[in-house]
Image (spheres, rainbow, N blue to C red):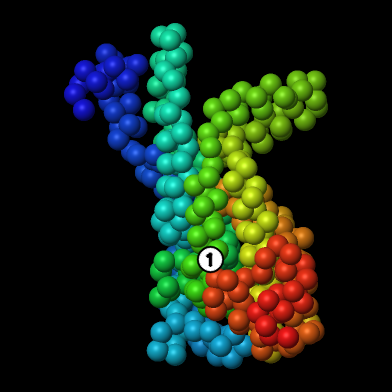
């Protein structure tokens, strides 16, 4: 692009400092990944120590994983790693968890940013010079805003994550699982849970999730739907102004409402939900509920064997997730994945319905092929799912 063309679209082309800054922003693509990584690191670490796990901790986790792995494989008949060994457990820091998660989810967030940017550039250029300048400025600022919003969300998620699968999505690094050792041990202390018991429970959850989410139904089914959902966002440049206009200045909680507004990435990025996403939502909800329900079943079954049937850990973890639910919900909202308490109960009811009718041996068929995941009608009527697969 010639300098004249750049200056024509850059309102600060004649001011060297701003010109350089605008060029840098314009060259970042639809999402500024440098900013995303920086904000993810800041959110993950915060003001708390983020200690490096020692070798003894890593060995302790992998030793417990040897035991957990045998039982997860026995119940699911699924592989948790190659050559009949479990995937390596990597104890890590919150900062590295954030970096890896942001890297793993980069294709999805890139699709989101591309969808919003491509549709933002389709409009007519305003005739008014000031309006045109502001429109150009907004376009050049968009990658930075996207980077800050996405990075902040992942950083907030990292601040309380215990393991890799806080969100039920397959990861590209199938040879290892990340565990935030300091967060696991701090949670054990806070809730007065024996450290080895909580470590074992987290490993069971991560290995079960790793096995289930690597199955064909996820890679070829759920992941494809999530990609479609993310790519279906459309820009709403008036979202922030409309939300500010709707605020009541006389409300005693007006300041809190403003703070919540500016922390909502949907508003800050100008992402507007579409009819296409509304149509995808029931199918996504049904799939996620079934997958989460199956993972919960495996975790509970293995935990009963290794930790006792009355172990309070699962409920403690669920309560903790509710307490930190806002951070997870924002990411889930962008990805179209709902893990609300009602969704979890819906998935559990579906799995229990299958077991009551035909036993647990049929559950692995849920994830052997994309077409085996339940439809919106079937998730609430397990008998319909069994009949469709001609299992009854």
**Pointer 1: what residue?**
221
Classify mark 1: residues with Cα within 10 Å, few (<14), some (14-19) or many (20+). some
Q: Is residue 210 visible?
A: no
Q: Give x and y (percent) for residue 188.
A: 66, 70
Q: Is residue 286 above or below residue 150?
A: below
Q: Is residue 306 above or below residue 183?
A: below
Q: Is residue 26 visible?
A: yes
Most extreme residue toward the left is: 2
- Position of the C terminus by quadrant: bottom right
**Corner quadrant of residue 293:** bottom right
- Position of the N terminus by quadrant: top left
Marks counted in the figure total 1
Q: Give x and y (percent) for residue 281.
A: 65, 53
Residue in the image at 47% along x and 37% along y:
116
Q: Give x and y (percent) for residue 355.
A: 75, 84
Residue in the image at 42% along x and 66% along y:
172
**Corner quadrant of residue 304:** bottom right
Q: Give x and y (percent) for residue 122.
A: 43, 28
Residue in the image at 46% along x and 66% along y:
171
Q: Is residue 91 above or below residue 67?
A: above
Which element carries disc 1, helix, strand or loop?
A: helix
């Amino acid at each position: 692009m010639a300098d004249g063309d750049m200056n024509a679209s850059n309102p600060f082309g004649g001011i060297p400092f701003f010109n350089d800054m605008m060029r840098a922003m314009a060259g970042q693509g639809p999402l500024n990944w440098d900013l995303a990584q920086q904000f993810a690191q800041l959110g993950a670490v915060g003001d708390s120590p983020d200690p490096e796990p020692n070798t003894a901790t890593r060995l302790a986790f992998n030793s417990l994983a040897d035991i957990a792995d045998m039982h997860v494989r026995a119940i699911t008949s699924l592989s948790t790693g190659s050559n009949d060994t479990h995937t390596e457990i990597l104890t890590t820091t919150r900062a590295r968890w954030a970096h890896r998660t942001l890297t793993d989810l980069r294709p999805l967030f890139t699709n989101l940013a591309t969808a919003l940017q491509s549709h933002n550039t389709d409009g007519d250029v305003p005739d008014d010079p000031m309006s045109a300048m502001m429109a150009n400025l907004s376009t050049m600022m968009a990658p930075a805003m996207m980077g800050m919003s996405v990075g902040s969300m992942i950083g907030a998620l990292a601040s309380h994550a215990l393991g890799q699968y806080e969100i039920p999505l397959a990861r590209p690094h199938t040879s290892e699982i990340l565990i935030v050792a300091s967060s696991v041990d701090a949670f054990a202390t806070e809730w007065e849970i024996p450290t080895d018991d909580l470590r074992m429970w987290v490993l069971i959850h991560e290995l079960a999730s790793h096995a289930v989410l690597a199955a064909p139904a996820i890679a070829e089914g759920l992941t494809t739907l999530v990609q479609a959902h993310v790519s279906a966002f459309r820009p709403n440049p008036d979202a922030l102004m409309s939300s500010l206009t709707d605020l009541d200045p006389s409300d005693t909680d007006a300041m809190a409402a403003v703070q919540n507004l500016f922390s909502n990435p949907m508003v800050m990025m100008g992402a507007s939900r579409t009819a296409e996403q509304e149509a995808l939502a029931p199918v996504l909800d049904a799939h996620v509920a079934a997958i989460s329900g199956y993972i919960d079943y495996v975790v509970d079954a293995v935990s009963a064997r290794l930790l006792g049937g009355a172990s309070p850990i699962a409920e403690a973890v669920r309560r903790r997730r509710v307490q930190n639910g806002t951070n997870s919900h924002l990411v889930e909202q962008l990805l179209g994945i709902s893990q609300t308490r009602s969704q979890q109960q819906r998935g559990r009811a579906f799995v229990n319905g299958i077991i009551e009718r035909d036993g647990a041996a049929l559950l692995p068929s849920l994830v052997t092929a994309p077409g085996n995941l339940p439809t919106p009608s079937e998730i609430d009527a397990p008998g319909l799912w069994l009949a469709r697969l001609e299992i009854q």
